[in-house]
Amino acid sequence: MEVGEGAGEDTSLNLPLPGGSGNETMSYVFEEVIVLAAQRFKPDIILVSAGCICCICKSTSSLQISNSFEPYKYDAHFEDPLAGLQFTTGTYYQLAKGIKELASELCRGHCVFFLEEGYNLRSLSNSVDESFDAFLGDPSLSSKLENPAVPYDEPSIIATQAIDKVKSLHSL
């Protein structure tokens, strides 16, 4: 797993998750990896490239949280044809809410989202809307936007093993 090199060592955090990972796995990743890494890094701003990467920046360096599942990638939605993951609009609501809380706690609320990717227009628009609702403090409408019975069981054991490996590698 890539961790960066030279002066950038321990500034890349890659989180490869198995296909089928969804809400449960992403919640675990956020609490057990992303929050801990961000708290240790103490950013000046959190940049979220919604489609590629979450970058937690200081004026002198940045911590890139990038990965094969890409934590805020809108094509990770279960209706999107590309990623093979099972995020729901509720996943994006919870992520945005958590990122807002992290930004408030760590960097005076400084956070910027950039929109990228997502190939199912219905799930993309609903997920972006849910992200904004979370940032504005509005309630989630995710239960009204999609059938929660559609996603399949997540590969929890394999996902937990991948997450535990990342936590060990980064001493989280």
Image (cartoon, grey):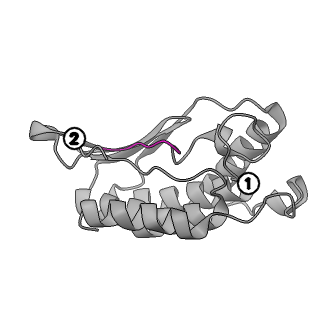
Disc 1 on helix, strand or loop? loop
The secondary structure that dominates the magenta segment is loop
Residue at 28% across, 66% down: 168
Identify which amino acid the numbered label 1 is placed on: Thr
Identify which amino acid the numbered label 2 is placed on: Gly
Q: First in sequence, mark 1 or 2: give its number.
A: 2
Which residues make up the magenta segment? 64-69
x%, y% of residue 132? Answer: 66, 47
Query: Any mark on residue 4, and which?
Result: 2
Query: Any mark on residue 88, and which?
Result: 1
Hey, which quadrant is residue 83 in on the image? top right
Is 75 in the magenta? no
Classify 31 as above or below 162: below
Residue at 39% across, 68% down: 164
The crowd level at tag 1 (other Cα within 10 Å; few <14, some 14-19, many 20+) is: many
Residue that protrudes farthest toward the front in the picture: 158
x%, y% of residue 3? Answer: 25, 46
Disc 2 on helix, strand or loop? loop
x%, y% of residue 19? Answer: 62, 50
Instruction: Name the front one of labels 1 and 2.
Output: 2
The crowd level at tag 2 (other Cα within 10 Å; few <14, some 14-19, many 20+) is: some
